Image: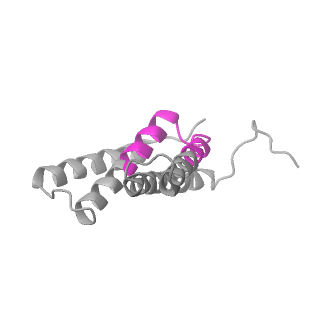
Amino acid sequence: MPLDPTSTPAPSAPLLAWLALASGGLCELALVALMRASKGQILSLPFAGACLMGLVGVAMMTFATKSIPAGICYTVWVGAGGLAVTAVGMYAWGEPKTALRIFGALMVLGGLILLKLTADPKP
């Protein structure tokens, strides 16, 4: 049975959209980790994995735009991915853990929470 793109989403659709968006953010973290592992070598398995994670992340965000406005969706996707990369960078990759970097990350997190709380589902 083909899906009708004009049909009304199921009540759980917004929750699934937010879960897809969170998964897309995790794909962005995997993308960056694999890019680091590739050490700049384009013809390598980690680089191919990074490309795949990028595609999966975009696919997840695209799915989420069915229920979440595109502007909020993209901002949350980029922000969540950026926060994840920043946290992993500071705690696993030896990047600096300064008070200002942590404060900046908390500001981004606060903005993401505010966007989530004020997001109306698509009509």
All told, the count of numbered labels is 0
Q: Residue at x 42, y 54 (%)?
A: 38
Q: Residue at x 28, y 49 (%)?
A: 110
Instruction: Give how far across and how far down residue 90 sits, in percent.
Output: 23, 60
Work out whether residue 38 or residue 31 is closer to the camera in this orientation and state it. 38
Work out whether residue 21 or residue 84 is closer to the camera in this orientation and state it. 84
Main structural element of the magenta stretch: helix, strand or loop? helix
Q: Residue furthest bottom?
A: 92
Work out whether residue 50 or residue 70 is closer to the camera in this orientation and state it. 50
Instruction: Give how far across and how far down residue 106 sits, in percent.
Output: 23, 52
Q: Is residue 44 left or right of residue 66?
A: left
Q: Quadrant of residue 6?
A: top right
Q: Is residue 101 left or right of residue 5?
A: left
Instruction: Give how far across and how far down residue 14 sits, in percent.
Output: 57, 50
Work out whether residue 28 or residue 3 is closer to the camera in this orientation and state it. 28
Q: Residue at x 31, y 61 (%)?
A: 88
Q: Is residue 36 left or right of residue 17?
A: left
Q: Residue furthest right?
A: 1
Read off the magenta span. Answer: 58-81
Q: Residue at x 54, y 51 (%)?
A: 48
Instruction: Give how far across and how far down residue 30 sits, in percent.
Output: 45, 57
The C terminus, quarter of image: top right
